[in-house]
Image: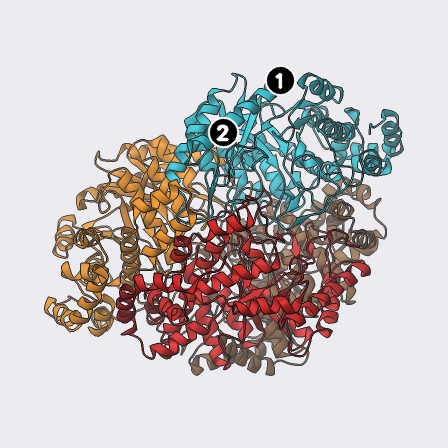
Chain colours: A brown, B orange, C cyan, D red
Amino acid sequence: MKLEPYKLQSLNEDQLQRHQQKFESVAAEIKNVDGLLQQLIDFQIAIPSWALGTGGTRFGRFSGGGEPRSLEEKIEDVGLLHALNGSSGAISLHIPWDIPQNAASIKALAAQHGLRFDAMNSNTFQDQAGQAHSYKFGSMQHTDKAVRKQAIDHNIEVIKYGIELGSESLTVWLSDGSSFPGQLNFRKAFERTLGCLQEVYAALPDNWKLFVEYKAFEPNFYSMTVGDWGQSLNYANKLGPKAYTLVDLGHHLPNANIEQIVALLLMDGKLGGFHFNDSKYGDDDLTVGSINPYQLFLIFNELIEGMNARGMNHASDLGWMIDASHNIKDPLEDLLQSVEAIKIAYAQALLVDTQELEKARESNDVVRAQEILQEAYRTDVRPLVAEARLRAGAALQPLQVYRSLNVRENLIKERGLKTVATGL
Amino acid sequence: MKLEPYKLQSLNEDQLQRHQQKFESVAAEIKNVDGLLQQLIDFQIAIPSWALGTGGTRFGRFSGGGEPRSLEEKIEDVGLLHALNGSSGAISLHIPWDIPQNAASIKALAAQHGLRFDAMNSNTFQDQAGQAHSYKFGSMQHTDKAVRKQAIDHNIEVIKYGIELGSESLTVWLSDGSSFPGQLNFRKAFERTLGCLQEVYAALPDNWKLFVEYKAFEPNFYSMTVGDWGQSLNYANKLGPKAYTLVDLGHHLPNANIEQIVALLLMDGKLGGFHFNDSKYGDDDLTVGSINPYQLFLIFNELIEGMNARGMNHASDLGWMIDASHNIKDPLEDLLQSVEAIKIAYAQALLVDTQELEKARESNDVVRAQEILQEAYRTDVRPLVAEARLRAGAALQPLQVYRSLNVRENLIKERGLKTVATGL
Amino acid sequence: MKLEPYKLQSLNEDQLQRHQQKFESVAAEIKNVDGLLQQLIDFQIAIPSWALGTGGTRFGRFSGGGEPRSLEEKIEDVGLLHALNGSSGAISLHIPWDIPQNAASIKALAAQHGLRFDAMNSNTFQDQAGQAHSYKFGSMQHTDKAVRKQAIDHNIEVIKYGIELGSESLTVWLSDGSSFPGQLNFRKAFERTLGCLQEVYAALPDNWKLFVEYKAFEPNFYSMTVGDWGQSLNYANKLGPKAYTLVDLGHHLPNANIEQIVALLLMDGKLGGFHFNDSKYGDDDLTVGSINPYQLFLIFNELIEGMNARGMNHASDLGWMIDASHNIKDPLEDLLQSVEAIKIAYAQALLVDTQELEKARESNDVVRAQEILQEAYRTDVRPLVAEARLRAGAALQPLQVYRSLNVRENLIKERGLKTVATGL
Amino acid sequence: MKLEPYKLQSLNEDQLQRHQQKFESVAAEIKNVDGLLQQLIDFQIAIPSWALGTGGTRFGRFSGGGEPRSLEEKIEDVGLLHALNGSSGAISLHIPWDIPQNAASIKALAAQHGLRFDAMNSNTFQDQAGQAHSYKFGSMQHTDKAVRKQAIDHNIEVIKYGIELGSESLTVWLSDGSSFPGQLNFRKAFERTLGCLQEVYAALPDNWKLFVEYKAFEPNFYSMTVGDWGQSLNYANKLGPKAYTLVDLGHHLPNANIEQIVALLLMDGKLGGFHFNDSKYGDDDLTVGSINPYQLFLIFNELIEGMNARGMNHASDLGWMIDASHNIKDPLEDLLQSVEAIKIAYAQALLVDTQELEKARESNDVVRAQEILQEAYRTDVRPLVAEARLRAGAALQPLQVYRSLNVRENLIKERGLKTVATGL
């Protein structure tokens, strides 16, 4: 299903007057609104291909309808999101779920939708049909060299697909670890994993980045071989300048201060990218901003501070991606909500009076520092985000448009009620 | 595969002399060893039918071989465990995974293996093929009366199967809850769930118990409608005298003091049963005693104290069941380890000098109270547990026997390499 | 120091025009703004007397200056807060820190400041000079009857002081528990505690409420004898209709869903009151709304839903109190920030379209339910809260006024630089 | 009070026969018992001077009697512990609580008791009377250079005292951090702290080590400037070869896998030392082994594996220290229990069949790996630990001797009932 521009425009027009009132009211308080809006327009969040279908838990899966049945349909879905919100101009693929049969035509299709290919993702946490060796006991940590070789080869193959599509980064998330005390020699597991990563690193093109993602637990329940930011940074430091740490919001122990981790990784020039989602207990993979939106704002506050301090470009110098799973929501609606939450947090963080904040910090005025952050956070920035969408040719109210155009119903008509997205 | 008694006996004989030395050394320190051994012999732990196959996580499943393909084969597997350890004399079934086609013959088969049928388990957390209504948004909490009716009817059907098999209790674990703030009216969800449970309760035979199991999170990640012991107790109190709380060790928030919960439920006569497993992060469903064996001991210490205070029979007045999941271990080996850990903890707790402990408590001698507990815990009780097995006609070293008789290899020969246990 | 009304008025006038623009912009979207403003005006949060001085941690204390040296000065401080924000019209006393020498004159002084006396707080977690028995091993749980008697008598004495001052509730927070496995017989500790509470309950006037506060850990680090809402509810149910559970936001295990607890306690008519604060790790006692303001909003959403369902009066049918501790902020500034955060959350929750929310829930429209909550939460309600203050004769910007009038400097001049508030 | 050797000997003799039976029964199963016993004898755990007095919580303190009133008396107390258990042959001092007036005579006194001086501890988390600048907003992270200078100078002074006493390491624990979002620029705080540590590092003698201790939270409740092992390692790497990470068991987020951290720090040659204690919720500072003794065993298992892999000397190549706080136990009894728990865990870990374990790991035999660990853990090693004490000339049953000689009563007679140990 393709979104027809005139329909979007017509729906926007209905809301235009009310929007402009609100926008002007907020804009009046902001210096250089246009600059801020341009930053909002430029900020794109990649959609992972596997988030377009319904996720599940180990207890079961409740499939939805109209899910994409092919890589082409996944690109169409992201294209549709991007048409609606003007902020989803990239897709992140997962191999082997998304092997492009014809890279050139896939690239062309993506270009039609205004999409580029973000980080490629490899998979050594599941066994694929016909696979020579099992990952039951890990991949890069495995005691058997043949398994490790298979994992290395797979990652190099993923890079190859990525090159064809114009991607410039590889995200390695390893589920490697152990579920029982005694099972693993932690040191040797680290060293074997490092050895494998070094071989993958050696295969990286010069303009590529390697993102080493960490996770505290699940699917292993005693130890993870890339278990926290300290371990990931250790790997990245040992690998070299093209290796970076990737932060997924749901991959921490309870109560972790993620914003501080972000700041310290940026300090060392080793933050590579971000997987957005939200969670209450573990890697719950809930909609971004649905549980703790203030934390999201605080993270953006650190991102902006740290990137500005290094003269980095907000839009392009880190990898931004959603990584959520949608059991009980329409996946496309969920992604619209997630992108909206990210843009809101980014806009709020851009409003922080950083000079005043640093002054308050210098004088240990804790009350004032909190006021400055909350002044920005409590501002209703939705009109700013909507205006940025409008200027980008997208919808003022993406979710509303999605519903009023009956997108899901149309997708079900096209694709059927009992589709299952390729992949998870 | 059937364990031949003479083989067991022959293996026991090889170890007998060394065992007796160790046993006598420990026994010399214990008053009334025979009484203690009888308690160990009597204490049986039910095996859940779904633990006989390989479990999985939402990221995948790595199947093992020789898994039971039918209810009959599940009973055989539990029979084999029971022959080995003399402590697994019950099986807990799950409907619809274990619907008996012919209850009488199933009952007879179980009797041949010395097994009885423990609590029946219903399933309203997954959709079965051909099911009229989906449990995507819950079962007993559902806003749609038809869904609730379906869940009630299913539970009543499970009771019916249980009656045929001689079971006397129903465990209701509801995955009902919500994953996003706003999704659920907590109060109405509670009231609807209570209403459904009341109808199931009304269908219980007089000699049956209803176990209301609670869980803090997963598969719902914002709220659970039977989320903690306080909620479960609230349901049980409102339902009536046949309703009890069931405690699963992995269903708590981080750092919860489970042994205190056990003590308080016993105080109110509302503890119904137990699901044993171990975990580090969430409901990890690891082998019992593999992560925190001291906690297991402390729980048994409370169980014994509380049951004795009420004059309860350790073996029969609560429901004892394992509920674990085995991704990377042979399920039968894992169950042997779990049962062993439970028996060890029980034996240690039986050694606690309760009179001295109460004296230390009365005088606030905290150091002494700790010494008394650790005196029991640090004792090597394995010879006691082995002796109890010996007297019950089982193996001195069940795991060793299992391996030396190549049980798994034989099961694979019988059943094939790529079986998947019915159910999960 | 007394706030002169004309100064307040003059400062308000400077900001009036800008305020009115903002207010009108928000008000235009709201039905029955006046009703909503009246609810905001009526909603008062009690200030605990111990929050007026600098708190500390076990590692040390960094005192501030100008802290109140007497009960009279504490009342003046709360009066000052109330003059500034019009929302702190009550004070919660703690015995023995705030024993009134002359109840009548204290009452008169409070009345001058427009203050009433909220819940009285007893203290059996510390030993006072000259005290006959020590609370080292607990108070109401203690094995020694004399200690329990002392704790009962103290609570009855607190009630007596409360009657003289016009208070109508007693909050009992017990630090009772144990720090080591074995130390305590959980059941007997519960029963002894219940016995003591029953004696205190018997001494309550008919129009009084007894609040049983729970806490998961600290200062005991293995078990707490009133450890969670389930235990507190159990006590309250056994005590009778005048006993209620009191929820302190910081007294939970990691990741607890407090809003659900609130909803379920309201369902059973057993929620008595609230202690507001915020925290990241434990009972951190940080400024309300400084860590997770969305959680605060979700809690208010449940409070309003549950109170409305029972026809309760928001302002008067529950006890609302701050319980925070201020190590590195000026205590009065901290309290102004806390009250502001509470009013903001309350205002946001009042904006929730509850009818639409229930409709979304009935149809399991999870996306819509989240949108409805976030529509309210994302609204900038600060102009509404300011307008309510204005109508109540208080400051548009309390914190700004506090600073521009140099309140702290004046208090230091009056009271000295090295004062320590009576109590903690 | 001094322990008379003949009394000890006489008490040992009473227990000798029973001990020898038990010892021989365990020893029969062990290869090279004498080697193992020598390792147990050599393994000494330093006692921190502040653990000799009663600790407290922010809610209060319940002092005990007979606490040491001077550095000399602290040394006497540790000497007494060492005489009893033969394993407490070192003391760890804290400046300014333990400033030696005459280093030579203090050294001589310690030598009389067979004690050496372990790591020195500095204190920049409290303000001392007469101190020029306050640490209210941190020390080495402070925005004010004068505060940082004061913290540097203090640490250099601590080194100076340590040199005089023969210590060879400095432990720096910083409580620096923030309690509110916005308060701190994380990056600048890290950089300022690093700058200060570099100046302290420059003042270290060549044979000294600098231990950088980390802590997740408390007394700051939003961020800590040395918050986890990743940050500590980052500082240590940037400082140089004499800087190491120090692990305190209670300084982690919930559910952290500490044993893996230990293994990875050892891998990089950056583990410096250990603070032993136990906890359930946070930095509870409970008796070692009182909450989770299996975790302690697993940590020792990693320590031994990692130290052996690097050819390190167990007894001398890492710093071993207890860091606990005793609110409701006699501090000396608590320390006896803690040392006993450490020795037991160490003995159990020495029994692990490491060759078989590595074989099981190589072949992914998870069940066997667990069996090997638990085989060691379930062994009753108390007779081994007692035998090591006996051979070292200490008590078979230290706690029993302590009580039967009425040590505390004698200390109270000597020092009075209402003493407070210098320091905390």
The circle drawn on residue C281 is: none
Q: Chain of mark 1?
A: C
Within the image, what quadrant is residue C397 found in? top right
Count of residue discs: 2
Q: Residue at x 34, y 79 (%)?
A: D32
Question: Along the horizontal axis of the image, is D84 left or right of B415?
Answer: right
Kindly report which numbered mark, 2 or 1, lies closer to the viewer in this rendering.
2
x, y percentage for residue A354?
80, 54
From where the camera sits, is residue B191 visible? no
Please name the residue that numbered disc 1 is placed on.
C164
Query: Which secondary structure lies at badge 2?
Result: helix
The type of residue carrying mark 1 is Glu
Q: CA distance from mark 2 to mark 1?
A: 21 Å
Q: Going by the image, does D79 lie left or right of D348?
A: right
Pinpoint residue A81: horizontal percent, then vertical percent.
63, 56
Q: Nearer the viewer, residue B222 or D30?
A: D30
For residue A327, side relative to residue B154 (left or right): right
Dot 1 falls on a residue whose secondary structure is helix
- The chain that hosts pointer 2 is C
- Badge 2 amino acid: Gln
Mark before the other along the chain sequence, 2 or 1:
2
Residue D10 visible in rendering: yes
Q: Are marks 2 and 1 on the same chain?
A: yes
At which x and y percent is residue C287?
A: 67, 42
Which numbered circle lies on residue C150?
A: 2
Image coords of residue A383 (percent x, y): 75, 45
Task: Give the residue furthest to the left.
Answer: B6
